[in-house]
Image: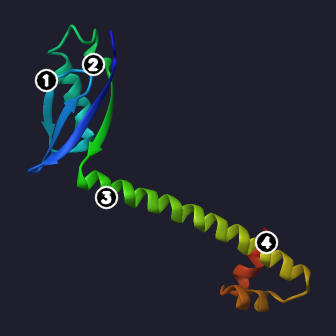
Amino acid sequence: MNNTFTARANRDEGWWTVTVDEVPGLFTQTRRLDQIPGMVRDALALFPDVTGDAGAAEVTVVPEGPAADAAQEAAELKDRAREAQSQATASMQAVARALSADGLTFRDIGNLLGVSYQQAQKLAVR
């Protein structure tokens, strides 16, 4: 018996309406996304022929619709920003080290990089 289920959630009039791919006709609803796995497990208990142990069912929640799409886009932008920040920090460290090796003062390095001389020193010695 299958014990892995995909719950598709759509926002509708203040509720998350939920269907389960593997169980046609199974429908439930909750106010919050974090309640979906428990609600699906409770609903699965009504279908003993589908799963042996509904309480141990693994439920993957897939939010759908405009709210989910907007949240996914925001999360992707956040991930790209985090990666860009990491690349910028690595570049600033490399430039600070190179400029320091060329004999520039930390004040000059800070001025060139747009950071304080203390931050320039930290970048150069990391």
Amino acid type of the residue that numbered disc 4 sits on in the rendered structure = Ala
Disc 1 is placed on an element classified as: loop
Q: Residue at x 21, y 27 (%)?
A: 40
Classify 10 Å Cα crowding around label 1: few (below 14), some (14-19), many (20 and above). few
Q: Position of residue 45 (x, y in %)?
A: 18, 16
Mark 4 or 2 closer to N-term?
2
Q: Position of residue 38 (x, y in %)?
A: 24, 29
* Occupied quadrant, residue 82: bottom right
Q: Earlier in the sequence, mark 1 or mark 2?
A: 1
**Mark 4 vs mark 2: in front:** 4
Q: Which residue is mark 2?
A: 55
Q: Position of residue 113 (x, y in %)?
A: 70, 85
- The residue singled out by tag 1 in the image is 25
Height in image: 72 above or below 56?
below
Instruction: For the residues labelled 1 and 4, say whether their Cβ atoms are less than 8 Å apart.
Output: no
Task: Tell me the CA gap for discs 1 and 2.
Answer: 19 Å
- Residue shown at 86% from the left, 88% from the top: 104
Q: Which residue is mark 3?
A: 70
Are discs 3 and 2 less than 8 Å apart at CB? no
